[in-house]
Image: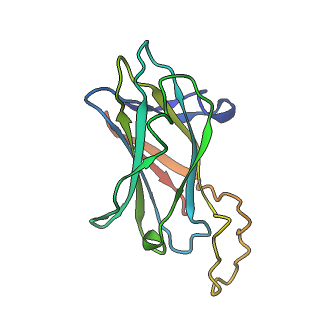
Amino acid sequence: RVFQASGKGINGSTALGVQTIGSFDAQIYIKTTTIGLKGNIFSFYARTERNGGGNRPVRVSYYFSDAGQKSQPQALGSSDSFPNTDTDYRLWEIPIPEHWRNRESVTLNLTIHYGEGTGSSARWYMDDFGISLSEAFEPDPSDPDPADPVDGTPVFPSLQRSEVLDGYTVNLTFDNP
C-alpha cells in the first residue's frame, strides 16, 4: 500500500507512506528529464515507524530506467537502515550516473521490500524529494548560466498533479526540474 500520510512528514507535513506485506513490495517511479539539469543527485528524507509487534524491517533498492534500458538494482543503505522501530528522518542521496545524464526522460525506480524477520514490517515514509548538486560536481563550461544554481541548493520540482491509477499505483506529475 502506497498512500499520502498526513502529518507524518518533516515538520508535520504530508509524506509519502508505504506499508509492505508478504505479497506486496511497493514501487515508486520518479520520472524526470536530465537535460539541462543543474544537479546530479536525487535526494530525499526517509524514516520508519514501528508497525505491530514484529521485528521485520523494510529494505529499499533503486535503479534507473529509460526506453527499455535499465541499470543494475542497488541497495539503499544496509539491512539495518530501515528497522521496524520509530526512527528520525534521515537524508538519502542517490547520485545520477553519467550514463543517465542529459536524457529527455529518466525514471528513478525505488522498491520498498518486505524484509526478513517476524510479524509485520516497518512502515516507511519519504519526504522532501529534490535534485541537488554534489560538491564534487564540475559545471559544464558551455552552460550559459553556471551560477543558476550551482551552490548546492536543492532544486525542488513542484508537484503539479497526483492521480491514483489503481489500488497500488499513484502517479505524481512534477514540473520540469
Front residue (pair 103, 152): 152
Q: Residue 89: x percent and y percent?
A: 62, 35
Q: Residue at x 41, y 64 (%)?
A: 106
Q: Quadrant of the C terminus?
A: bottom right
Q: Residue at x 63, y 31 (%)?
A: 88
Q: Is residue 32 visible?
A: yes
Q: Residue at x 71, y 59 (%)?
A: 153
The total number of labels drawn is: 0
Q: Residue 29: x percent and y percent?
A: 40, 50
Q: Residue 164: x percent and y percent?
A: 38, 39
Quadrant location of residue 141?
Answer: bottom right
Q: Residue at x 36, y 36 (%)?
A: 113
Q: Residue 16: x percent and y percent?
A: 50, 36
Q: Quadrant of the N terminus?
A: top left
Quadrant location of residue 3?
Answer: top left
Front residue (pair 55, 113): 55
Relative horizontal placement of residue 7, taking residue 167 as reference (left or right): right
Front residue (pair 128, 173): 128
The coloring applied to the image is rainbow
Above or below, 99 relative to 5: below
